[in-house]
């Protein structure tokens, strides 16, 4: 079985400083190969010629996709063209499965005449990572995305939904037949993310102390609810001045992992934290994976205050690192956090509720340790890439047998 896994074409695979979809594509390809599947990744490259690259034994076909910098909706255009060029490059590769993962690359592949007219037409699998499908009120741009993504999922031979809520939304709103939608969550590399990693120079450089900081990981954007976290942290500190805890916000200060600079939203939050909390809040910007796993492993807990999530990889990475997780009651978060077992849930958008939950975890060391142990065990048993990959491989085999 030969499988081509299609990335977004926007963030290089493997990702070095964030990119959940790209991490999913890379880890799936890596673990499929361990199961004997001939899997490879198709990614973009900002050059004039295609190259075959390798990372951790995973072949990565990098194909040229170039867009003018002043082109409107440049990322959308690049992703769509990347999908078209991917279809063209796959024409001579005799693949059995094409596994797409993003709206515009998937749309380009599903509408491609090139793949449709092959004598041996490859089967199309689509994993939906879009967290907004369960939401009823969305902006106009999301309706456009839903049109493209819905078309792709209806054309696909199988669709993978990351959680039950998303599965139901896909069936109802995208009109995808239920029997071809499979609920399979994200996976996590439990060998890479693990407890007990020495802080070394990372914590020293950032002026952090083991277990004395709360961690947020992700893009600093409104949908991630970072402003809710800041207000909750400020409330907890003001009411409990004896706590020597800090807040670390690790991730891009823009809306995308492949963007640089600082958004207006991030600037507002940075200024707010300086005025209200001084040195108790640290915005690191994007960090590399080695730094990230050390930050996880030595944190007091991870907080994810998002307003919408599909199946957040950061929760799995934190759990694999042996720390408790606090998350909003949004999307796939409620499928991961068992309240009081591996972490705590709080009311979506409520900084008051989050402040209370933060205080419980920060002040109760025994509870924190117990939830951290449970989190690690759950990550290994339920979300290890070894078990997730086997479930996806079975979907491939089922589709090929039809």
Image: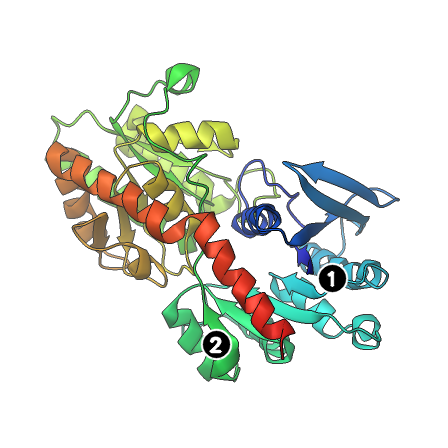
Residue that carries the numbered disc 1 in the rendered image: 83
Residue that carries the numbered disc 2 in the rendered image: 170
Horizontally, residue 365 falls left or right of residue 137, namely left
Point 34% across, 50% down: residue: 381
**Quadrant of the frame with the C terminus:** bottom right
Horizontally, residue 389 falls left or right of residue 322, namely right
Q: Is residue 183 above or below residue 280?
A: below
**Tally of marks:** 2
On the image, the x and y values in percent for residue 35 come to 57, 51
Point 35% across, 18% down: residue: 207
Mark 1 or mark 2: whose residue is earlier in sequence: 1
Q: CA distance from mark 1 to mark 2?
A: 22 Å
Horizontally, residue 163 falls left or right of residue 263, namely left
Name the one closer to the observer, 157 or 105: 157
Point 13% across, 41% down: residue: 360
On the image, the x and y values in percent for residue 274 come to 34, 30
Q: Is residue 201 above or below residue 94?
A: above
Secondary structure at numbered mark 1:
helix
């Amino acid at each position: 079985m030969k499988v081509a896994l299609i990335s977004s074409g926007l963030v290089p695979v493997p990702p070095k400083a964030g990119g959940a979809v790209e991490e999913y594509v890379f880890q799936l390809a890596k673990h499929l190969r361990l199961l004997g599947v001939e899997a490879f990744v198709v990614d973009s490259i900002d050059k004039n010629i295609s190259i075959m690259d390798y990372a951790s034994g995973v072949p990565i076909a990098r194909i040229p996709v170039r867009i003018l910098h002043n082109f409107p909706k440049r990322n959308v255009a690049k992703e769509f063209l990347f999908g078209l060029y991917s279809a063209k490059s796959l024409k001579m590769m005799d693949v059995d499965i094409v596994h797409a993962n993003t709206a515009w690359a998937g749309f380009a592949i599903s509408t491609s005449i090139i793949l449709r007219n092959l004598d041996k037409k490859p089967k199309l699998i689509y994993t939906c990572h879009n967290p907004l499908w369960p939401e009823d009120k969305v902006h106009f741009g999301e309706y456009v995305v839903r049109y493209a993504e819905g078309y792709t999922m209806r054309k696909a031979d199988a669709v993978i939904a990351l959680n039950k809520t998303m599965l139901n939304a896909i069936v109802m709103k995208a009109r995808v037949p239920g029997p071809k939608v499979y609920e399979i969550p994200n996976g996590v590399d439990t060998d890479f993310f693990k407890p007990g990693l020495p802080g070394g120079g990372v914590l020293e450089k950032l002026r952090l102390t083991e277990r004395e900081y709360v961690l947020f990981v992700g893009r600093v954007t409104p949908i991630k609810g970072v402003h809710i976290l800041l207000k909750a942290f400020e409330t907890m500190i003001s009411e409990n001045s004896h706590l020597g805890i800090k807040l670390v916000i690790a991730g891009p200060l823009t809306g995308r992992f492949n963007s640089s600079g600082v958004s207006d939203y991030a600037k507002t939050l940075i200024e707010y934290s300086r005025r209200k909390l001084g040195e108790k809040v640290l915005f690191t910007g994007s960090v590399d994976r080695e730094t990230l796993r050390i930050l996880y492993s030595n944190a007091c807990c991870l907080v994810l205050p998002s307003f919408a999530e599909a199946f957040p990889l950061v929760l799995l990475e934190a759990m694999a690192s042996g720390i408790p997780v606090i998350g909003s009651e949004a999307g796939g978060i409620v499928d991961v956090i068992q309240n009081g077992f591996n972490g705590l849930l709080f009311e979506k958008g409520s900084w008051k509720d989050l402040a209370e939950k933060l205080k419980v975890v920060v002040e109760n060391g025994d509870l924190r340790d117990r939830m951290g142990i449970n989190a690690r065990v759950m990550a290994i048993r339920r979300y290890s890439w070894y078990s997730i990959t086997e479930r996806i491989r079975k979907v491939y085999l089922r589709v090929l047998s039809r």
